[in-house]
């Protein structure tokens, strides 16, 4: 369920203070935040953030296309390590069974009489 329109987007008040302070100082240090639920607003454009994903901080620079999204969308919390070796072996055997049995085997060409017009 989305947030009510009359309330406006949620931005953590402490994060908003940090962004205002960052813009007034024009420092190049990124802002470290744990507030993944905060919505990106136009004031954040051009600011660098370090967003916590539960284990480490992911560096993100805010652009115009990110406005309206949540900070947590750009810091994935899970990492895909691949499928199990059993799945890889099954895929490899299936691929090898589809290949021709003899190395020099070629499909026979279709005659002109067998081709549909």
Image: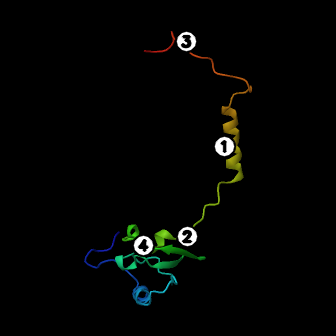
Q: CA distance from mark 4 to mark 2?
A: 14 Å
Closer to the N terminus: mark 1 or mark 2? Answer: 2
Q: CA distance from mark 1 to mark 4?
A: 38 Å
Give me the residue at 71% from left, 52% from top: 85
Q: Which residue is mark 2?
A: 77
Give me the residue at 44% from left, 73% from top: 62
How far from the left and from the top, in percent, is residue 57?
57, 77
Protein image colouring:
rainbow
Viewer-nearest of discs 3 and 2 = 3
Picture quadrant where residue 101 is located: top right
Picture quadrant where residue 15 is located: bottom left
How far from the left and from the top, in percent, is residue 74?
49, 69
Give me the residue at 25% from left, 77% from top: 6
Q: Which residue is mark 1?
A: 91
Q: Residues within 10 Å of mark 3 (few under 14, many from 20)?
A: few
Quadrant containing the N terminus is bottom left
Q: Secondary structure at mark 2?
A: loop
Q: Residues within 10 Å of mark 2 (few under 14, many from 20)?
A: few
Q: Which residue is mark 3?
A: 111
Q: Is residue 67 above or below residue 92?
A: below
Q: CA distance from mark 3 to mark 2?
A: 58 Å
- Give the mark count: 4
How far from the left and from the top, in percent, is residue 81?
65, 60
Closer to the N terminus: mark 1 or mark 4? Answer: 4
Viewer-nearest of discs 1 and 4 = 4
Q: Secondary structure at mark 3?
A: loop
Q: Which residue is mark 4?
A: 70
Of all residues, the one furthest to the left in this rendering is 6
Viewer-nearest of discs 3 and 4 = 3
Q: Residues within 10 Å of mark 1 (few under 14, many from 20)?
A: few
């Amino acid at each position: 369920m989305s947030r009510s329109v009359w309330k406006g987007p949620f931005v953590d008040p402490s994060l908003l203070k940090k962004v205002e302070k960052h813009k007034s100082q024009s420092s190049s240090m990124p802002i470290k935040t744990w507030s993944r639920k905060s919505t990106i607003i136009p004031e954040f454009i051009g600011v660098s953030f370090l967003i916590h994903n539960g284990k480490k901080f992911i560096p993100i620079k805010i652009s115009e296309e990110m406005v309206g999204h949540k900070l947590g969308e750009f810091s994935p919390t899970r990492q895909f390590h691949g499928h199990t070796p059993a799945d890889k072996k099954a895929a490899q055997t299936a691929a090898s069974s589809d290949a021709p049995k003899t190395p020099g085997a070629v499909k026979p060409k279709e005659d002109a009489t067998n081709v549909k017009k």
